[in-house]
Amino acid sequence: MAVRVNSPRARYREQTRSEIKEAAVRQLADGGIEGVALLRIAKEIGMSGPALYRYFASRDDLLAELVHDAYQAAAAAVHEVDIEAGGRTALHALTSAYRAWAVAQPHLYLLIQGTPVPGFTAPAETVLKARSVLGPFLTVFTQGRPLVSVDPLLAQLRVWLHEKPEVADWVEQWTGQSAAAPPAAIALTGAVMTWPQMHGTVSLEITGQFTGMGHDPATLLNVQTALLADAFQLP
């Protein structure tokens, strides 16, 4: 006899939770974090306020779900990139894919990378979701042969790699290299250096800071990515 995975009640609950989150994302797109209000969401989907609280205990509870979903979407965009070619070609493809996702979903990007929400503490698993976005970058930088100028950061991250088993596990998952293997620290350093370069450009673009500056943000990101590839002598 076939086993029922979900009861009708459970399916209804998940559908309702999805409708609530979809309404919250619309409010997020229209008015930012400040625009997300549980009572307005309840009214929009035809539900009473007290009824909505049976699905999300608080606004922070709902925001935590949205943060989780946003990281999931960002990771999916990056993980879809074919990095088989490796080297700088793969690195360019990854940064371009991340930028494309952020530009297409600026409200979700700003939810996870914008100004922190006062009083809101993201759940602990948020760190794992953020690391998932960077995972493919670790794989690419395994091929790196960093210049001497990278050595100070490389030395610090080598120590971090040995001190934090969870970081070592994450790096090994994506590179197949143990913490003791030189490529592991190189991969971690490359990913860490990519993070601020990529987000600096994307954040300034999404918040309109490049308006009137006479350049295409995509071109700027490509140049910065090329400089990172050069610093690690990626093939």
Image: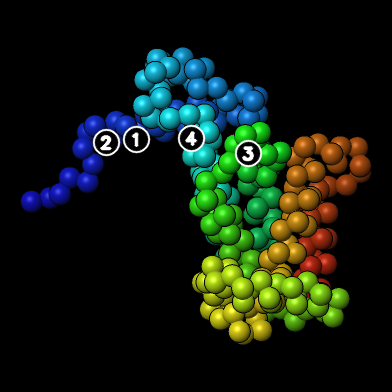
Residue 170 vs residue 92, the one in the foreground: 170
Q: CA distance from mark 2 to mark 1?
A: 6 Å
Residue 10 image label: 2
Q: What residue is disc 1 on?
A: 14
User: Which circle's residue, 4 or 3, is located before the other in the chain?
Assistant: 4
Residue positioned 81% across, 78% down in the render: 151
Q: Secondary structure at mark 4?
A: helix
Q: Nearer the viewer, residue 235 or 150?
A: 150
User: Does residue 183 sit above or below 10 in this rendering?
Assistant: below
Label 3 SS? helix
Numbered circle sitting on residue 111: 3
Q: Is residue 133 above or below residue 207?
A: below
Q: Residue at x 91, y 43 (%)?
A: 214
**Secondary element at image label 1:** helix
Q: Amino acid at mark 3?
A: Leu
- Outermost residue, bottom direction? 181
Which residue, given by chain and number where applicable, does mark 4 sit on? 61
Q: Marks 4 and 3, Cα distance to the nearest angstrom? A: 14 Å
Label whose residue precedes the other's in the sequence (1 or 3) = 1
How dense is the environment of label 1, judged by Cα within 10 Å: few (below 14), some, or many (20 and up)? some
Q: Earlier in the sequence, mark 4 or mark 2?
A: 2
Discs 4/1, front: 4
- Residue 73 percent across, percent down from the top left: 54, 47
Residue extending furthest toward the left: 1
The kind of residue tagged 2 is: Ala
